[in-house]
Amino acid sequence: MNTTIDVTGLASREFWLRHRDDLRAGSVATAQALGGSYDATPGDLTTARAALTPATRAALIRVTGGRPLLLWVSAAAATALVLRRFGAEGAVTLLAGAPLGQGLPALLGPDPAATFREWLGTVRSVAAQVLENGDADAGTLQSLLQGDLTFTVDAAGDPAAEPGAEAAAALHLGAEEITVTSRLLPAERLSALATGVASVLEQGLADPDRRLADLGVLDETTRHQVLVAFNETAPLDNGRPYRDLLLAQAAQRPDAVAIHDETDSFTYRQLCSYATAVALRLREAGVGPESQVALVAPRSAWFLVMAVGVLFSGGVYVPLDPAMPAGRRDRLMRDAHVVVAGTEVELPQESGTTRLFPQHLREEVESAPGPYSPETVQELLGPPAAPADLAYIIFTSGSTGTPKGAGVEHHSLLNLLATRLPDYGLRPGVEVPQTAPLTFDLSIWQMFAGLTAGSTVCVVPDDVVRDPAALAAMAVEHRFGCLALVPTFVAVLLDHFEDAPDSAAAVRATLGRLIATGEPLSGELARRWHAVMPGVELLNAYGPAEVADDSTGGPVTADEGMYTSVGKVLPNVRVHVLDADLHPVPPGVTGQVYIGGESVGRGYVGQPALTAGAFLPDPFSAEPGQRMYRTGDLGRWRTNGSVELLGRADNQVKLRGRRVELGEIEHAVESCPQVARAIVELLKDDGLERLVAFVTLTPGSAPTAEQIKEFVAGRLPAYMVPNEVLTIGELPRNRNGKVDRKALRVRAAERTVPTAAYTAPRTPLEAELCELWATCLRLERVGVTDDFFALGGDSITGIRIVQAAGRRGIELRPRHVLEHRTVEGLATVARRRAADDADPRAAAHPGADRSPAPLTPAQLAFFARGVPRPDYWNHGVLYAVRRPVTTEEVERAVHLLAERHAMLRARIAPVDGALAQTVSDVPPPVTEFDLREVAADALESRMHASATELHAALDLGAGPVCRAGLLRLPDGLHDRLVMIVHHAVVDLYSWNVITEELSTILRDGGTAALDPVGTPYTEWARRLVEFVRGEPESLNAEYWLTRDWSRCVPVTDTRAQGVEGNTQERTFTFDKAWTRRFVAGAASSGLTVYEYLLTALGAGFKKWLGAPSGDLQVQLGGHGREDLFDDVDLSRTVGFFNTAYPFALPMLTDPADGRQARAVADLIRNIPGRGLDHDLLRHLHPDPGLRARLAALPVPQVLFNYWGEPGYLHADGDGGDGDGAGRTPGPLGDVRIDISGDDRPRDMPRPFPIEIYPSVVDGCLTILWRFSGEVFTAARMSALVESYAEALRASVPPANSSAEETI
Amino acid sequence: MTYTVVVNAEEQYSIWPEVKALPNGWRTIGFSGGREECLAHVAVVWTDIRPKSVMTAAS
């Protein structure tokens, strides 16, 4: 053997590279099991401990002999199993701490069938391999990990040590306890990890021959909490048979209305006597326990009477949709003993099935009603159904395409109905609306529960269910106590309420609660409900048809986060959240939801194999032989025992090897305020995988696909951001109102545009309707004979059209659109509201006479971010007013300033579907704050708070976009003036102008001393648009499109940028002497300070990233006041001009090397149009394809914006100093931007994980860093700040002394 | 993962991971295999999903 040290290193390198893919997949699995980094805020070091029992401690010593390596093996073996319990799929990658060698990755894949002893052996051999190959170079090792969160396990280090710079968390096995530390993970998760590892060691070492599948991770307390405490429910009276419950009501209130629809009404006496007669007729046909009776008829009051009759007979109620294709229906009726169907339904001629007709049956029983006294009914029909008899069958769609008939027994039905009475406030006198299709399990309690309580069931017709205005009117007229809707309909109902405050108020006064059910309720929708309908309780409910509809339920607050709670476990139901080995997981950890207890259905009727696969033994039930249903839903416990659902287990897809929860992406897309609902599908064609999001929008919003993608990119890792976003009017639904994913896939594959002959509108009304249709259907134009459905219309679009028409004073109903289907037809029924009852919303916009100007690229870039509160993104500057001023003086000064600078009076709002800016006549308001009595130590925070009030009160659409505050301070202190301006109308340079002019006006009382203002901002905006339209070829797109961005090294794996509130700021300030040398050094090499700063930036990042080579992708920002037109003067224009464009910055080795610096400077000087080209092309180019290509460029993770020397910051008696010789200085001075209020909301998504703003203030180079606190640890941030400072220092020849200070 | 076919006193069938302890009230019937194999076997031996007590009452 001819080995040398070098060759050994190579062998190790090869070993690691061979395992790289697995290690990377393992690190992703680890990160997922740890819980994702997205809601973690790096904060103080958190530590969780779990003590080892004396027996475990003794066993550890016995098994390992106290050898550190074997202790590490034990800790790692237990940790890997815990991560599997926490959801890691397959093997996990752990980082080895002491004694194995810092940072070496170990891949561990526990096999549930292995014994603990065997598993220890496996881990030991992995550890040996890792040790053998520990001499690989750092670069190789660094490339092995991919997850966002890493986990170090050590058995010999310092338990209190911080996780290493790269590790999200560290676990330490000590002599007496397990310690887990992290700055990123929540304390509960750390504690669950520590407890889990301690429990596994305890069980595994006590009996090493136990299989991993039998080792749990919960301690006794948590186990009791999730298995027992969360399932302890209030006692419930559920023992009385259904028939007895109804007969008792009939005896008590024979003449009260039990059921009614628009035409029919049945009292309790009628209901029970007719139901008894129906039951007798069914008995004649041979119906008894377990015989299926198929009811194939439309929803109506009479239908409900027949259904009750089926239950009275002891038979099984099987509702079927008369509109269903005949072949499918025949299959479902195969086992029916009796079929009740109207003449329109054709039945196969065969079998012993008895056919009855609803109308005949009705005539029959009305002419000969049965008795309704309990004794007589008992005499005629015998005892009521037994608890274990089948009550009903609801067919659900099967993944195989064959519908599955979920059978539910009487005891489960009775339990469900009993929970409804207190929860939904059902009692005599209350009307319960029946809205759901009968084939949807939601209909079961809607039909049957109210009748056991003496309430009145109101069958709401389909066209009312789909017409929010009509539904609201009906809710008020009939004083509905509750209303149950799927979230999609909740959303359109809210649209209506927002348009019609009177209707909302009326419903608020009568409706007790709204129940959202059937599909996930987004946190955003919940928030909207509470905002629009305060006081009306919002309930969520969850449960599949297989387990008697609902298994959990409870109130939803306005502040639920991304996932709303589906409530707590309902009485006599048991819910378990289990991992892949059927072990319970602790609160906060995601697992699959299993439902046991009273509500477990019988199974899929006639399908034993499907039943056996979905209904498993319940290992946690005290009663032997019980079953639990595997829902396929992913969920987690909250610590209060309520359940959060996170999506479907079978929605899980693998995208380029990564586990992706479509539900999670859907939630993220839905948290975009403009998105109402989102469904994400993974489409594969020609081997190409794309994530496609299908979205419906909230009314009035029109975000581009790019905006939505950018928004999502702020919340999810890059690989989970949809490749395509398709906006559709309505999500296709199956009969039960649930989203039809299959139809969506088809729609994505074949999107066609109708091409009917175009007939232009002939009347103003037609023209207006055509326009509305085009807007709502997202078409360029609509002809008066075009068919609504052919254009892609659907019922939700119809509702939106009606709502939009209402805002324009045109009265329509949703059914009109569906019935008439053309603009021509619709115009015949549309009625224009008389002028005197005009919709107040249609009032003319103020300043509408001034023609709207387009937005500039800088403004468009901001709106493209789609932040939740665009109104709140401001600049604020606080000045001392160094002479006494009256409020009137300040008002006058601010008004004069705003007169000169129209953008301080701007309004930005949609005009014809696109955002545009206009100028209002209303001057910015001035607010006075009396802080004269405030104590000295509270003064700054009160000043800041006052300014924050003003910040939060800007409004881009309605105004104002600028506010001034006059802060009256205690005697002896100068009063303060704070100016708040929305960033979309102001930039840093503008503040020089504002500061100087305001000070001068306050000094002079007028504007005579000020230079005239040049080109207005709106004019600049128009000129830019004309320029790009007129001479697009003069702009260079190729520069950006042909760049090799793939050389850019990512600074973080995650694309989560976090929110402003978690921003971590660092400021690094160089002293004056050093700054002077730095500036001189730049000048002597013929470079600008900006170029010098950037060169060093590359070097700083190179070291921090440990990157051997490559570029850093930086978003460069410039002031943007570029000299494009000869006749334009922007020197005194207040507005938002900044440019922002991506740049590939080479990461150099030596910032002091003049040649390297000049090379970088050349690259910077070659950026076309100093970046403005990019912004103009990306936002204003007439070709949407080009805009999209530019928008699709990789997004930098680092923003670099050199502020230069912001003059206004050291304003000291600024006062038009151009000609200021001999004049007294103006009164404004002592400028502060640190106590000028919170200029953006804490929950605003950050644009970049890292922002860098260098500036020179008071002669000192100051680097302001803004980091996403969610993404970087404190140590990582400090390391980067220091690394850049070091590169800057290295770029200047050393001098005698250079002291820096870090603030 | 290997499963085993199990049955309870109501003669309701199901499947259970072979490596896990058998839950209370369930017994094996001597058939183990992959998930699909076990379910196929269930389809053969379990022809009527009514619980035993319901069938007894009906007869």
Image (tube, grey):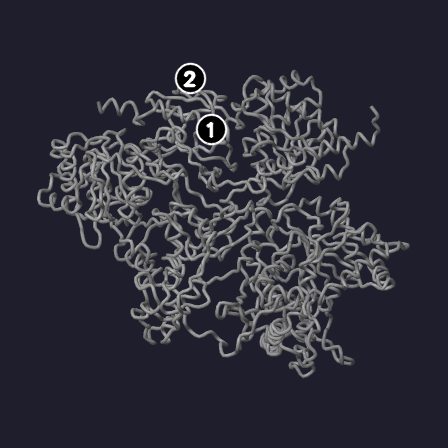
Left or right, A1204 with respect to A586, comes to right
Numbered badge on residue A858: none
Chain for disc number 1: A
- Is residue A967 visible from the viewing direction of this image? no
- Indicate whether A23 appears above or below A565: above
Amino acid at circle 2: Gly
Whole-percent x, y for residue A73 in the image: 66, 24
Measured as percent of width and height from the top left, residue A982 is found at 59, 66
Subunit of mark 2?
Answer: B
Q: Nearer the viewer, residue B17 or A1241?
A: B17
Mark 2 = which residue?
Answer: B30
- At a point 73% along the width and 47% down the height, the residue shown is A1278
In the depicted structure, whether residue A524 falls above or below residue A905: above
Instruction: Name the residue at 31% across, 41% down.
Output: A420
Residue marked by disc 1: A224
Q: Secondary structure at mark 2?
A: strand
Front in this rendered view, residue A170 or A44: A170
Residue A400, horizontal then vertical, whole percent: 40, 37
Marks 2/1: CA–CA distance? 33 Å
Outermost residue toward the right in this view: A1296
Foreground residue among A13 and A672: A13
